[in-house]
Amino acid sequence: MEMPAATKQHQWLQQLVGEWTFEGEAIMGPDKPAERSKGYESVRALGEFWVVGEGEGEMPGGGLAKMLITLGYDPAKGSFVGTWVGSMMPTLWVYEGRLDPAAKALTLGAEGPSFTGDGKIAQYQDIITLESDDHRTLHSQVQGEDGTWTRFMTAHYRRVR
């Protein structure tokens, strides 16, 4: 069996490899002030097809959290795929997404528990945008019942090396 070749989408992911610090701001509920957090993430290649990021940071409101993200590209699906888990919650987030036409922003969709605590499932997006070689942003948003998206978290990642 011949091994598949890495695609331009796989190569795009390699731009995330490195050591990063981040500063973020999250809105934890209606009528609550934004809470700040900071931490670091180490992203490594797992061969040519995958990247794995391990992060650690302050939780909004205090405490330490650890996170793990996997990202790849599935040519059969024609989309980026991945997972995210964090030590602060029992949910496995499963991603599927696409790059924008300029190949600067990767929008990853996932389903997860609603913020309202009503037991319903909500649609989420994490959007990774390459601002420069050494700066990327992550925006997280949730879709309301009316179909509108509400951004609840923004983080700026700066490459350390």
Image (tube, rainbow, N blue to C red):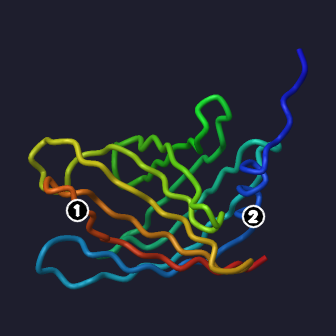
Q: Amino acid at mark 1?
A: Thr
Q: Is residue 78 above or below residue 103?
A: above
Q: Position of residue 91 (x, y in %)?
A: 35, 43
Q: Position of residue 22 (x, y in %)?
A: 55, 78
CA distance separating discs 2 and 1: 31 Å
Q: Is residue 148 above or below residue 93?
A: below
The residue to which callout 2 is attached is 15
Residue at (69%, 60%) from the top-left corner? 43
Q: Which mark is residue 148?
A: 1
Q: Secondary structure at mark 2?
A: helix
Q: Amino acid at mark 2?
A: Gln
Q: Position of residue 32 (x, y in %)?
A: 16, 80
Residue at (48%, 63%) from the top-left corner? 127
Q: Residue furthest right?
A: 2
Q: Is residue 102 left or right of residue 15?
A: left
Identify the mark nearer the N-term, 2 or 1: 2
Residue at (61%, 37%) from the top-left corner? 78
**Which quarter shows the N terminus?**
top right
**Which quarter shows the C terminus?**
bottom right
User: Residue 101 occupies which quadrant of the picture?
Assistant: bottom right
